[in-house]
Amino acid sequence: MGSEINLETTETSWTGGWFSWTRQSDVMLRNVEKTILSCLKTAYKRFYVDIGSVVGQSDKIWTISLNDESPKTPLVLLHGMGAGLALWCPNLDAFAATRPVYAIDLLGFGRSSRPKFACNAEKAEAQWVESVEEWRREVNLGQFILLGHSLGGYIATAYALKYPDRVRHLILADPWGFPQKPANPYENTNLPLWVRAIVTAVQPLNPLWAVRAAGPAGKWLVGKTRPDISRKFLNYVPDAEKIIPEYIYQCNSQTPSGESAFHTLMSGFGWAKNPMVGRIDQLDPKLPITVLYGSRSWVDNSTGQVLTDQRTTANTYVQVINGAGHHVYLDKPEQFNKYVLEACARSDDNDNGRVPDKVAPPADDGATIHNVNNITTTDNNTNNTEPKTTS
């Protein structure tokens, strides 16, 4: 069902020489990605988009497009840290049923170029924003709906701050980097002292350093430490417990370009040096925003309330999906897809792309819904959270 255009498999500076098996990893990444995407029912195209010298000398963004002939407003997907475009496979068919869909490997991740980002948080953020904008220019998109998960949500928001006229609707899936880092982040946790010591010791290292340090055993390490991620794909990908760890490993076994940039942005894994909460008031007040949190996620969802409080004249919609963790798009894909499609439809219904009302979607999943200042939550045990993840 899919085609691949302008595939590159040669060793270049942007694929890097991190390990002797790097070139083999690029070929294996291509193949394992293709295996995952074979579950799609919608025809798709995969191709590189040359964005020029945004960060490196010749940067390229690996892209998948579906239903790109539809006249509807396109939906663009930005993945999280350590992930890649293939992890959207439980969502792509549903999204592409009504409109063009584009998913990319963010610069520095997956099969995209791996240049050396700036070592300054503001500059690294700006480089990611410009890479998305140059990609948009090359693909020739006008306005589009922008959806970002985790780190992708942070980048999507930064993009909306810089290019508000390009974004018709901003959708954030369990976004990283929004709240202010507390003075003592471990004060209200039950972490043993030795665990806190280890966390402090490894903070200077890139988050996924252990995957690369393990060499070829890295895929085994991924599968053993996060078997829950593989299980999320059992209904979509044959032999998912083998294929998904392989994909995540291959995405992260090469030069840690995007990972290093993420490390530059972060102040401890859970927080950003320049948190978005301090910039919410700079977002276009006419820009509709939908935020989808997982009730079991480690991400602090209190920023959802801050969004609605600060954007009193704007259309801001916040949904907490019961039973979902940080990978909200994988944990509850049917509910997630429904809320995303509803947000897209509201943008279509309004000529200027602004949501006309603040109506929450119905609670048809058996959960109890509470509406407080346009924040929709579900009854759940919020203390039952999942471990921090790689994407």
Image (cartoon, rainbow, N blue to C red):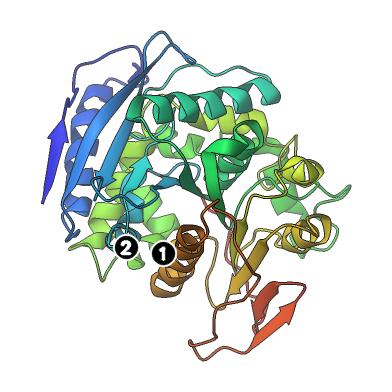
Q: Residues within 10 Å of mark 1 (few under 14, many from 20)?
A: many
Q: Residue at x 28, y 47 (%)?
A: 246
Judging depth in this view, the residue of 17 and 332 nearest the camera is 332
Q: Amino acid at mark 2?
A: Pro
Q: Quadrant of residue 326?
A: bottom right
- What numbered label is drawn on residue 12? none
Say which quarter of the image contains residue 232: bottom left
Q: Residue at x 78, y 54 (%)?
A: 193
At 39% across and 35% down in the image, what residue appears?
141
Answer whether labels 2 and 1 touch (C-beta < 8 Å): yes
Q: Residue furthest front?
A: 351
In the image: residue 211, left or right of residue 37: right
What residue is shown with label 1?
330
Above or below for 61 versus 192 = above
Amino acid under disc 1: Leu
Out of 250 and 114, give the one closest to the viewer: 114
Q: Secondary structure at mark 1?
A: helix
Of the numbered discs 2 and 1, the one sitting upstream in the chain is: 2
Foreground: 21 or 78? 78
Query: Which residue is under mark 2?
Result: 90
Q: Position of residue 310 (x, y in %)?
A: 82, 55
| Vertical arrangement, residue 131 with respect to residue 360, above or below | above
Q: Report how far apart the C-alphas of labels 2 and 1 lie in the structure.
A: 7 Å
Q: Where residue 238 sits: x, y (%)?
A: 17, 63
Instruction: Tell me: residue 74, above or below residue 130.
Output: below
Q: Is residue 61 visible?
A: no
On screen, residue 7 versus residue 321, left or right, reads: left
